[in-house]
Image (cartoon, rainbow, N blue to C red):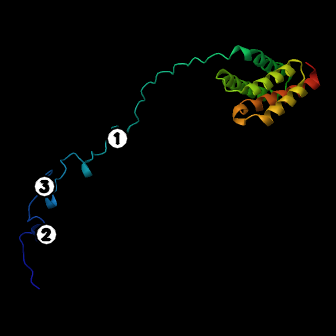
Amino acid sequence: VSTQSTGSSGINAEYGGGQHLPLGGQGYGGQQQPPSGQGYGGQQPYNPATYAPKTPEPVAAPVPVEKPAVPEQYTPMLQVLESAVGDCKNATQNPTHKRKLDEVTVKLDALKEKLRYDCVSGNVVDELNGIAGALHVKDYNQALFIHSRVAQSANFSEVGAFLPGIKVLLQIGAQLHTVHHY
């Protein structure tokens, strides 16, 4: 086995003939080397300022959208329901009842929203008027009977946002009415 010398280094001769490569010049196999100041693969070297949290730009406050009024034909029914909530809140000292009545107010807001955009069928509106009529004369049993009829016959997607709240109102009202007769 003979060993042949290829100059100052056999490796240099085999891979480029002993040439010294300047920074940013031609690399092995004729590939362009990145200019100094760039990292591997042409990426910039790590700069902490690049990754620092950016100050968010101020966002303009959303413009309130004016909702249409609830049609007037629903006002008497809504007034009776809201009045019943107020009567029950005034008649109870039970914190659980007060919390549930606050939730009923939210459910009545959902009813208003549906009425505002005409998303409640005529049959359900008629039944709600029946509930309001029974509430007006403090006939909670009749109001609960009408409520159960609505719950059994109406489409849940139509009444699910508010009917459970009305049931809670009727149950608390019935309970308080038998105790206090307000």
x 16%, y 56%: residue: 31
x 76%, y 19%: residue: 78
Q: Which residue is mark 2?
A: 11
The x and y percentages for residue 36 are: 19, 47
- Give me the disc on residue 100: none
Where is the C terminus found, in terms of image quarters? top right
The amino acid type, in three-letter code, at marker 1 is: Pro
The x and y percentages for residue 39 are: 25, 49
Q: Secondary structure at mark 1?
A: helix
Q: Nearer the viewer, mark 3 or mark 2?
A: 3
Going from N to C along the chain, the mark reached first, 3 or 1, is 3
Quarter of the image for residue 135 reads top right
User: In whole angstroms, how far apart are the C-alphas of marks 3 and 2?
Assistant: 18 Å
Going from N to C along the chain, the mark reached first, 3 or 2, is 2
Is the residue marked by circle 2 packed among few (<14), some (14-19), or many (20+) residues within 10 Å? few
Q: From this viewpoint, is residue 95 visible?
A: no
* Residue 139 located left or right of residue 105: right
User: In whole angstroms, how far apart are the C-alphas of marks 3 and 1?
Assistant: 31 Å
Is the residue marked by circle 1 packed among few (<14), some (14-19), or many (20+) residues within 10 Å? few
Q: Which residue is mark 3?
A: 26
Going from N to C along the chain, the mark reached first, 1 or 2, is 2
The amino acid type, in three-letter code, at marker 2 is: Ile
Q: Secondary structure at mark 2?
A: helix
Say which of 79 and 168 sits in front: 79
Say which of 133 and 123 sits in front: 123
- Give me the disc on residue 48: 1
Name above or below for residue 131 compared with residue 71. below
The x and y percentages for residue 115 are: 69, 22
Quarter of the image for residue 161 reads top right
